[in-house]
Amino acid sequence: MTLVTTITKFKAKLGLEDQLIDALRSFDNSNSTSWQILSLGDNEYAAVNTYESIENRSMDVVSGLDWLDGITPILELYEDGSRTQAFSGIVLHQNETSNY
């Protein structure tokens, strides 16, 4: 199995942080094996998703774009005009132990 992790950053407009967090929570993450929402400070948040394959990740791309269109009014655009900043990669090592 080749795991793939994606990290997508979003920046909420001032005062709309809770709406963005709710929107991130409501996204259907059922194609991913795990996901987290991180607070990065300064109204910025990251969604971290891990998938069992690039094909599983690809299934979220179309629904993700439709979902992103719906939350665009609460997002502050990045300097380049993008709604998000994202990258992904193949997981080279993962610790399977969880103690929390």
Image (cartoon, grey):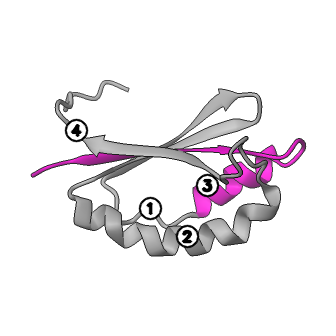
Report, in whole angstroms, how far the alpha carbon at label 3 lies from the one at label 2. Answer: 13 Å
- What residue is pinned by disc 3? 24
Q: Which residues are magenta?
A: 1-26
Q: Is residue 82 above or below residue 57?
A: above
SS at circle 3:
helix
Q: Is residue 33 above or below residue 41?
A: below
- What residue is pinned by disc 2? 65
Q: Residue at x 21, y 56 (%)?
A: 52
Q: Is residue 20 magenta?
A: yes
Q: Residue at x 73, y 41 (%)?
A: 79
Of label 2 and label 1, which has the lower sequence position?
1
Of label 3 and label 4, which has the lower sequence position?
3
Q: Residues within 10 Å of mark 2 (few under 14, many from 20)?
A: few
Total marks shown come to: 4
- What residue is pinned by disc 1? 29
Q: Nearer the viewer, mark 3 or mark 4?
A: 4
